Image (cartoon, rainbow, N blue to C red):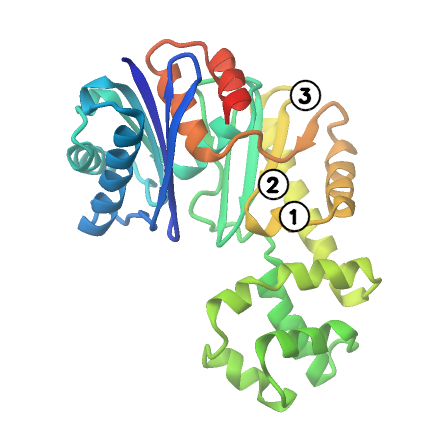
Amino acid sequence: MALLIGLDGGSTKTAGVIITQEGRVLARARGHGSAIVGAPSPQASSVLASIVDSLCSQAGASRDDIRSCGVGLSGIDFDDELPVQHEGIAAALSIPQERLILVNDAIVALWGAAVKPAATLLQHGSGFTGAYRARHGQEVLFDHLSVASTFDMRQALIALVARMMNGMAEPTPLKESILEHFGIEDEREYCEVIYRRRVPTERRQGTPSLIFAAWLEGDPAAASLVDGAVGDYALAANAMIAATGSPSPDVTFGGGVIAQAPEQFWRSLANAIQQTHPLVTVKPPDLAPEFGGAVMAGYHVGLDPVQLFQQSRVNA
């Protein structure tokens, strides 16, 4: 057998898939986070190795059957760190370095997001990831260090609720909804609770669904947050579209925050982008990032990425 593996590792989870060179899916696996900072940690290495073990076991394959392995990890950010990261991950996976393609997780996400040669991707989950390309094999990261501070509804909401309390913004029902969500009975405690980080991270990260619900009900504060997100997402997309040099790339958006968005949000986002670039298609990703890793792996050994993508999508 000559098989392809794709892995996608972030701070909270890692996902993997093993496919044939014709795009037939043999196995999938998930595990804990495997993001790295600098050299791969023993924990991240262990997670990645266990997922490859699981994939090979399910597929009835060995490491010798792996023709190419495409890995996208959060933390693959700097060229000067890549050699030690590549060597360390290859050793952890017991795969020869020449069979391993190691990239930032945004790159494998882009490979899975769209089949067109020209494409862009912005993901908003626990953080932001972005990438674009003019053609297959020319993927480029977009603000991968998050220095440009793309608008985050969750963070803006925290400040907006405080402004409602101190008279800087008109209170709306969204304020009470957030206080209840955070488990704060006395609003006078809000600023101290926030400042001293007493609200669990999952509750702070779980506010987009409340914002979208309030927006659909006509809450003006929620509308200001949604408008801010749409506007900034569109700015990022327009910058990447221009960099592709194509008038009609696939423009994809993903991640947990955007996945919760209602259809009205997608229409607003598409309208905002198509005002400047009327020929683009705005859509969610077609395939999960781990499939993108496998397609990328196939491309690097000479397989047709379009055909492999399409067949993987049929079998996903």
Q: Secondary structure at mark 1?
A: helix
Amino acid identity at mark 1: Asp
> Disc 3 or 1, which lies upstream in sequence?
1
Provide the residue designation for mark 2. 236
3 and 2 marks in contact (CB < 8 Å) = no
Task: Residue 190: name its quadrant.
Answer: bottom right
Amino acid identity at mark 2: Ala
> Disc 3 or 2, which lies upstream in sequence?
2
Q: Secondary structure at mark 3?
A: loop
Provide the residue designation for mark 1. 232
Mark 1 closeness class: few <14, some 14–19, many ≥20 residues within 10 Å: some
Which quarter of the image is occupied by the N terminus?
Answer: top left
- Residue 40 visible at all: no
**Going 65% across and 78% down the picture, which residue do you hit?**
180
Q: Nearer the viewer, residue 96 or 190?
A: 96
Provide the residue designation for mark 3. 248
**Going 44% across and 17% down the picture, which residue do you hit?**
23
Q: CA gap, disc 3 to disc 2?
A: 16 Å
Compared with residue 277, is residue 36 higher up or lower down, i.e. above or below? below
What mark, if any, has residue 48 been given in the picture? none
Q: CA gap, disc 3 to disc 1?
A: 20 Å
Q: CA gap, disc 2 to disc 1?
A: 6 Å
- Residue 32 visible at all: yes
2 and 1 marks in contact (CB < 8 Å) = yes
Residue 291 placed where, x, y %?
44, 28
Q: Nearer the viewer, residue 47 or 300?
A: 47
Compared with residue 213, is residue 59 higher up or lower down, i.e. above or below? above
Residue 58 placed where, x, y %?
31, 30
Does residue 199 appear left or right of residue 71 in this picture?
right
Amino acid identity at mark 3: Ser
Mark 2 closeness class: few <14, some 14–19, many ≥20 residues within 10 Å: some
